[in-house]
Amino acid sequence: MKIMKLTFFILWGSLTFHSLVYGIEVDGARDESYGDPVAVQNIQTGFGDPGSELNAAYALVSEGRLHLMLTGNLEPNFNKLEIFIDSKSGGQNQIIASQNPNNDNWAAKFDGFTFDSGFSADYLVILRHGFNGTQLDLDFTELGARGKGSLVGRFDPVGLGKTGPFEASNGMVLGFDNTNSLGIGSNQGQSANRENAALVRTGSELAIPLNLIGSPKGEIKICVMINGHGHDYLSNQFLGAMPEWTRNLGTNGQGDFIQDSSLKTIDLNNYEGDQFFVIPSSGPSLRILDFSYDFASGKVSITWASSPDSFYTLQSSIDMRSWQEIDDGIESQGELTVHDHLISDDKSKNRFYRVVKE
C-alpha cells in the first residue's frame, strides 16, 4: 500500500476530539508522503558532479498548497533553478520579453525561447544561491503584460544553521538541502542510472499556495531546468528529462555561450519526449469532517472528505509511534465517506486515529 495522504484525529480519554492534518515538513528532505517520483533524470549532468543536477521530481497537492520536491544539487555560484508552471488557460508557449516582467533579467534572456507544444507557462519560480551557500534567493513571477515579478525571499541557510522552512513574503515556503553526494554522474549526456537518481532524498523543496498560481482545479504542468547565473546558458538538466546524449544546450542549443544573446533559438519541440511533467488533479483534500462516539457501546463513527473511486485504511495508536490497522479497503462513498469502528478494549485510554488514502 502506498500512502498518498493522511489525516489524523485524536480521541482524548474517550471524551473529547480534535483533528490534525498531516503536513509535509518543508526542509529540503523528501518525505515519504510524496510517494513515487513524477519525473526521473535520464542523463548525466554537464554542470559538474555534484555541481548542479536534477535527479527526480516529486509532487503533492494538499491543503491548498502545491508541494514540490526536486532532488539534486544547485552549485553555490548563482546558477539558476528555473521552475515554470502551467496551471491555467492561456499562458506563453513562446516567451516574449516585452510581454513579461523582467525581474532578475530573466525575460530578456528567455526572449524567443519555446516550450513543448503541450506547455504554456503562466508562472515562474527562480531559485539561486551563492557566496559559499550563505545567500539563497527566491523570485516569483506571474507571466504576462500585467504580471508582476520580484524577489520574495533572501535567506542565509549557513548562518541560520538549518535547511528550512524558510518563509517567503508571498506565502511560499522553501526548504533547501544541498548535501547530496550520490549524484547521477558527470559524463555529460550519457545515460544516468535512474534507480540511483530516484534514491536521492535531498534538494530543493517548495510549498506554493494554490491561490498564487490561479487556484487550479485540474492538472498542473511543471517544466524545470538548471540555467547559468545569467539565465543565458542552459544545462542539459531538465525535468521531464532530455533524451540520452543531450549535452548542455548553452545559449543557442549547440552548447555555445553567446554574449548579449537570448535563448531565442532553443525550441524544446526539437528534443524527444516532453520536457515537462504533469501533476494530476488532486480532488478534495483528505480531512476529517465529523465524528460521533458512544461511550456505552464503544462505537466511533467517522466522516471524512473523500474522492470517488478511492479506497482508505483506518489505523489506531496510543502513542502516535506504533500504528495498528483497524480496517482497510474502505471503499469511498463519494465526496463523503462514513465509517464505524467499535472499541472493544479499555475505553478510558487516549486514542489516536488516522485515515490513509491507499
Image (spheres, helix red, strand yellow):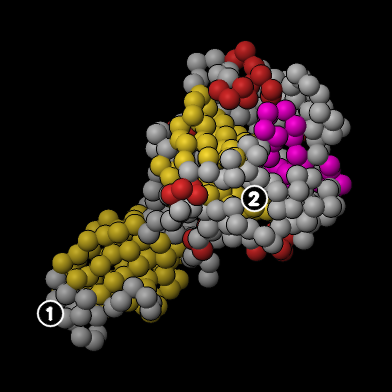
Assign a secondary structure to mark 2. strand
Residue 116: x %, y % from top left: 72, 33
Residue nearest the viewer, comparing 334 with 93: 93
Q: Is residue 257 visible?
A: yes
Please say whether residue 89 is visible from this viewpoint.
no
Residue at 24% across, 58% down: 290
Give how far across and how far down residue 261 sits, in percent: 76, 19
SS label for mark 1: loop
Quadrant in which residue 129 is drawn: top right
Q: Residue 339: x percent and y percent? A: 31, 68
Q: Residue at x 59, y 60 (%)?
A: 201
Amino acid on which disc 2 is placed: Asn
Q: Could you tell me residue 196's position as x and y percent?
A: 71, 63
Label number found at residue 77: none
Pointer 2 residue: 73
Q: Residue furthest bottom?
A: 345
Q: Earlier in the sequence, mark 1 or mark 2?
A: 2
Instruction: Specify the segment rendered in magenta.
Output: 223-247
Residue at horizontal 33%, vertical 64%?
Answer: 8
Instruction: Determine if the magenta segment contains residue 307.
Output: no
Q: Is residue 242 magenta?
A: yes
What residue type is disc 1 on?
Answer: Ala
Residue 75 relative to residue 262: left or right: left
